[in-house]
Image (cartoon, helix red, strand yellow):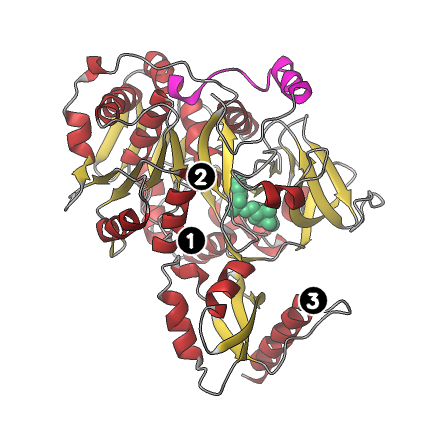
Amino acid sequence: MIMDGFTAWPEEFAQRYRSAGYWSGEVLGELPGAWATRFGDREAIAAGDERWSFRELDARSGRLAAGFRSFGIAQGDRVVVQLPNVAEFFEVLFALFKMGAVPVVVLPAYRRNEVGYFCQLTDAVAYVVADEHAGFDFRTLAAEVRRDAPALRHVFVVGDPGEHCALDTVRDTFSEGWFDGMPIVDPAGVALLHLSGGTTGTPKLIPRTHNDYLYGSRASAELCGFSSTTVYLCSLPAAHQFSLSAPGALGTFLSGGRVVLGPHPAPDTAFRLIEQEKATVAAVVPPVAALWLQAANHTGHDLSSLQLLQVGGAKLSSQLARTVRPVLGCRVQQVFGMTEGLLNFTRLDDPDETVFHTQGRPLSPADEIRVVDDADQDVPAGEPGHLLVRGPNTIRGYYKAPEHNKAAFTEDGFYRTGDIVRQTPTGHLTVVGRAKDQINRGGEKIAAEEIENHLLDHPDVAEAAVVAMPDTFLGERICAYIVPRNDRAKAAELLAFVRGRGLAAYKVPDRLEFIDALPRTAVGKVSKERLRNRIATAITSMEESS
Ligand code: OOB
């Protein structure tokens, strides 16, 4: 079934990807059954006290699928899934895949404003949350979201359900035989909707098909040498595409390996898990890599099982990359990926200098890469330019966003990544900048326009421009320049206002600067470049004088 709002690959490309064997024609819902047959009682997931074998994952997701059906959830329905790193995250995803329903995978950090929007945009019929996590009560959030999303009929809760319905009840009402098989699911149809970091006022959803998602995950698992002996520590949010499928948990399951879910990436907790579970691979963002490297020098934990540290989501400095082997005793791999699809990896046998200085090269031999100038003309080899990509696991359009798609894709289907890169003669890419209006706060992406719109809703704000400011730990933080409408405008109040808008906490500006007028370019656009330079200079001189 091809969903509304989804742009399929033109048949010529689809045929090419199928005949090259990239698109296998499998669907995600078939996988747990196949794994149960192949890997049986081998442990698939370790999360806190929960330990599930492949057989158990299959049985649970089948029973839950039967339960979801009994609540009227049907093939093609969208279900928003917002869970922390608990085993049930995978149970829910695979239950939905088995039914041919479509999970909308939402990070735990998101709040009312964002989740409400996703529910409305997708006409989601159900919302799955944990009771509480990191001191936040998701049941209250669910009740609020439900008020504004008329299509949302059910809220299912992992843990204590409060006023909603317990996921345990949904599953436990049904024994294993109840799920009477999968419906026919089109492998070229949408399997799940991921969130994009976004560059515009409203966040975008990314429709990933069974074919393209499975290909990306399986091919990256192979590239990273995953096998049945892989123990993957997932301590970033499992809902992020990096940890879900690049190769992530899905790549680990496909290889018959074991996924260890960590509650958060703090070094003490992560190191304890590495030691206890003998983790062989971990995936982190650069600030977490920096924390681990600092902490590893004086840890009492045995980290010798770790063979590979994948670092991605934001640029890793070559200095930090160099210290991974001496300090952690394992190989480092740079991963330059995007939820829209393209994945670049340094290879396990790349020379050290390539691993330290580049962000890798495309996963697929079928990835078509272009590096172009502002007029879409190819730049000379080795020069910096905009990265464009077309390939077997890169989307051809965002979900229900026809206007935005005209700008985000070329007419012949290349995705405009918004990243500025240089390409080496070996095809490796070095990320040298960003053209998109986004802040990358240690791997967490913030669309400047989204925050500007919230600020502009405040009566004391005449104009707002949000830019990245350099930060030694996170790489970037958020700086908001405000032209006040009157002398009542106060930074603390504006920040409290943004906080009250129901957004992920990491989107709240780290700093607010009042300014008389925003600098403009010759054509009258706000010059974000000048604002970025201005705040960078201010920070440097502050650091020098302290
Ligand atoms: C990953 O996905 P997203 O969708 O959160 O963000 C994608 C963007 C890229 O376009 C780029 O701007 C930035 O994040 N990025 C990097 C990077 N990895 C991602 N910039 C520099 N160096 C890197 N290594 O972040 C993502 C998805 C799958 C795997 C890994 C990361």
450 left or right of 412 in image: left
Which residue, given by chain and number where applicable, does mark 2 sit on? 243
Which residue, given by chain and number where applicable, does mark 3 sit on? 525
Q: Which residues are magenta?
A: 11-30
Which residue, given by chain and number where applicable, does mark 1 sit on? 296
Secondary structure of the residue carrying numbered label 3: loop
**In this view, 31 is above or below 444:** above
Give coordinates of residue 332: x percent, y percent.
55, 43
Give coordinates of residue 367: x percent, y percent.
67, 30
**In this view, 267 is above or below 258:** below
Q: Residue furthest front?
A: 150
**In this view, 201 is above or below 181:** below
Q: Could you classify mark 1 by the number of other residues whose Cα lies within 10 Å: few (under 14), some (14-19), or many (20 or more)?
A: some
Amino acid, disc 1: Ala
Which marked residue is nearer to the observer: mark 3 or mark 1?
3
Mark closer to the chain start, 3 or 1: 1
What is the chief secondary structure element of the magenta stretch? Answer: helix
Amino acid, disc 2: Ser
**In this view, 233 is above or below 367:** below
Q: Which residue is at 23% across, 53% downward?
A: 140
Q: Residue furthest right?
A: 380
State the residue in front, 164 or 174.
164
Which marked residue is nearer to the observer: mark 1 or mark 2?
2
Q: Which residue is at 15% across, 26% downward?
A: 172
Circle on res. 506: none
Disc 2 within 8 angstroms of ligand 1 (CB): no
Mark closer to the chain start, 3 or 2: 2
